[in-house]
Amino acid sequence: MTRSTTASGFTLIEMVVVIIVLAILAVIAVPKFINLKQDAEIASIEATGGAFKGGITLANVKWASKGGNGPVDNLQVFGDGSSGQLDINQWGFPAQNYPPFESSPRLNNVADCMSVWRTVLQDAPVVSNNANTAGAEYLATYISSDQCRYFYLPEQTMSIYYDSRNGNVITDSDPNS
C-alpha cells in the first residue's frame, strides 16, 4: 500500500512570471503618479490665471457700464472701500490701485502690477517683487509699459501675463517652456 502525496504551491517559473507582470505594471503606472505634483501645480496656476482674467473682465465691464470713456480714477469694482477700487486706464482696463487722484493712470511699475493682482483677486495668492519673501507664491515683474508677468515661484517656468492695453491675460502653464 503506497501513499501518494501531492504538493501544492507555485513553481519557480510561475513566481517569475508574476514578478515580471508586476514589474511591467509598475513601469507603466509609476510615471503617472510621479507627475501628480506637477499636474496639481499646473491646475493651480490655470485656476489662478482664470480667476485673474475674470476679475480683469469684470473691472472692464464695470468701467463700460459707467460710460466707458477714457481713464477713471478710483472706480469701485469690488466690495466696499479703497481696497476694492481700481484706477482704470484709457483703454478701460485696471492699471493700479492707489487712493490719491491720478488723471491718467497707467500700469508703469512693479508696485502697480502687485496692486492690480491684490485688488482683482479676492483672497489672492501672495505676490511679491522679491522671490525670497516668506509665503510668496508669485513673483510680480514689470515687463514694459502697461505689461506685467507673475511667475509661479514653485515652478518659475510657469507664469501669468497681463497686458493692460487690451486686457489680455495669458497663462503659461507649460513647465517645459
Image (spheres, helix red, strand yellow):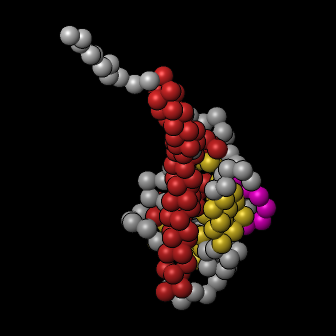
Magenta highlight range: 141-146
The image quadrant that residue 1 belongs to is: top left
- In terms of secondary structure, what is the magenta stretch mainly? strand
Residue positioned 51% across, 59% down in the render: 47
Depth check: give the residue in front, 128 or 54: 54
Residue positioned 52% across, 53% down in the render: 44
Whether 59 is drawn above or below 6: the answer is below
Whether 102 is drawn above or below 138: the answer is below
41 magenta-colored: no
Residue positioned 26% across, 16% down in the render: 4
Q: Residue furthest right?
A: 144
**Can the viewer see residue 126?**
no
**Can the viewer see residue 158?**
yes
Q: Residue furthest left?
A: 1
Percent of width and height locating residue 10: 40, 25
Depth check: give the residue in front, 63 or 57: 57
Q: Residue furthest top?
A: 1
Whether 165 is drawn above or below 49: the answer is below
Residue positioned 56% across, 39% down in the render: 24
Depth check: give the residue in front, 174 or 169: 174
142 magenta-colored: yes
Percent of width and height locating residue 126: 53, 46
